[in-house]
Image (tube, rainbow, N blue to C red):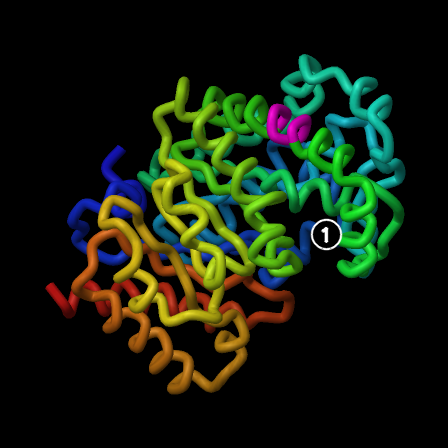
Amino acid sequence: MKSTYLQALKCESVDHTPVWFMRQAGRYMKDFRKMRETYTFMDLVRTPELAAEVTMQPIRSFGMDAAIIFSDILVLADAFNLDFTYIDKLGPQIGKKLTVSKDILDIPLDAIEEKLAYVFQAIKCTKEQLKEYHTPLIGFAAAPFTLASYVIGEDFKGDDKKMIKWCMSHIDFVHEALEFISEATIRYLKAQVKAGVDALQIFESWNSYLSWKLSEEFSAPYIKKIIKAVKETCNVPITIFGTANSNYYSQLLNSGTNAISFDAKINIAEARKNIPKNIAVQGNLDSFFLFRDRKTLMNEVDRILLSMQDHQGFIFNLGHGVMPETPEDAIKSVIDRVHCFSSLKS
C-alpha cells in the first residue's frame, strides 16, 4: 500500500504531510452519538461490525491519512477476566484487581487471542472497508505501566499519588505484573498484525505521573521489550505516544521505535533536532486549540507545519486526543489546512 503515513514512518519523502488524530473516532462526532443512543460503549467495542463502522466514520467525513481501530486501551483487562466495563460519565471500571502473584498465575496467556477475537474481527472488517480509501489501519495497546495503573493494587479512583505510593511498597509484585502485562501485550499486538493492521501505536498515557527515575524503571524498559519482541516476527512500524514524552523521549531513542509521538508541552521542531533522522516524529497540536476561533487555530497549525517543513518523517497529530464537544468543523478545517499547506509548499 502506498501511503504518506507509512512513508513518513519510514522517514521517506512524501507528497503531503500525513495527518490523523488520536481519538479521531468517537464521541465528538454526531454519527457516533447517534449510535450511542442504541448501543453501549462496550457494545461498540465488542461488536466487530459496529467497531468497524465507528473506525470508518472520521475517514469518510474528514479524510485522515490513517485510521485507528476503535477499541480501548483496557481491553486486555477483558482477556484477564477482571470485570472490565465502561460506565457513562465515569469511564472505564475494573471490577477485580491484581494484588498478589497468584492473581497473575491464574490468568491463561494462551487464551488472549480467543477472548479478544472481537478486536481481530473488527480489524478484518475495517480493512475490507478501507480498501477503497487506500488508507492504512493502526492497531494499538496500552504500555505496561499504563495498563498496570488500572489493573493492579487497590481502587485508587484516579488518585495517582495513592497509586505510586502503593507501587513503592510493592516493588517486586509491580515488576512481576509489568513482566506479565508485557508478555500479554506482545501477544495481543502480534495478533493485531496477523489480523491485518498496517502499523502499531503504544500508549503510555500515565507516564506523566512518573519521575525521570521511575520512568526508567517502570516504563521505558518494558516498552523496549515489547517493541523488540514484536519486531522479531512482525514487519510493521511502531509509534510510542506518551503524555510526558516531551520530558522522557530520550529514554526511548534506543527502543527500536519508528516514531515518537509528542504531547503539546514541547516545541516539536526543537525535539526533532535531538532525534535520529531514522525516527519519525508525530504531534503535537494542543487539543484545546480546536476550541479556539478559526484564525487562531489555523495560525497554530501553520506554526507547527512551518517549523517542520524541512524535516522528513513528520506526521501531524494532536498532543493528546480529540476531546468531547470538539466542533467537527474544527477537525475538518485542520485536516484540510494540513493537506492544503502541503500542496502549496510543493
Residue 152 versus residue 87 in the image, above or below: above
Q: Based on the displayed image, in which of its 4 quarters is residue 284 positioned?
A: bottom left
Residue 174 in magenta?
Answer: no
Which region shows up in magenta?
A: 179-184
Q: Position of residue 76 (x, y in %)?
A: 69, 32
Could you tell me which residue is drawn at 37 percent across and 41 percent down?
A: 254
- Left/right of residue 49 with respect to residue 76 in the rendered view: left
Q: Residue at x 67, y 39 (%)?
A: 45
- In the rendered view of the protein, which quadrant contains the C terminus? bottom left
Q: Is residue 272 left or right of residue 56?
A: left
Q: Identify which residue is drawn at 48% across, 42% down.
A: 201
- Residue 261 versus residue 342 in the image, above or below: above
The residue that disc 1 covers is 36
Residue 271 percent location from the top left of the image: 34, 63
> In this view, which residue lies farthest toward the left?
346
Is residue 128 left or right of 55 when viewed as pictured?
left
Q: Amino acid at mark 1?
A: Arg
Q: Residues within 10 Å of mark 1 (few under 14, many from 20)?
A: some
The foreground one among 77 and 272 is: 272
Which residue does the image show at 78% across and 60% down from the upper left? 161
All told, the count of numbered labels is 1
Q: Main secondary structure of the magenta part?
A: helix
Q: Is residue 67 left or right of residue 174?
A: left
Q: Position of residue 72 (x, y in %)?
A: 65, 43
Residue 88 seen in the figure: no
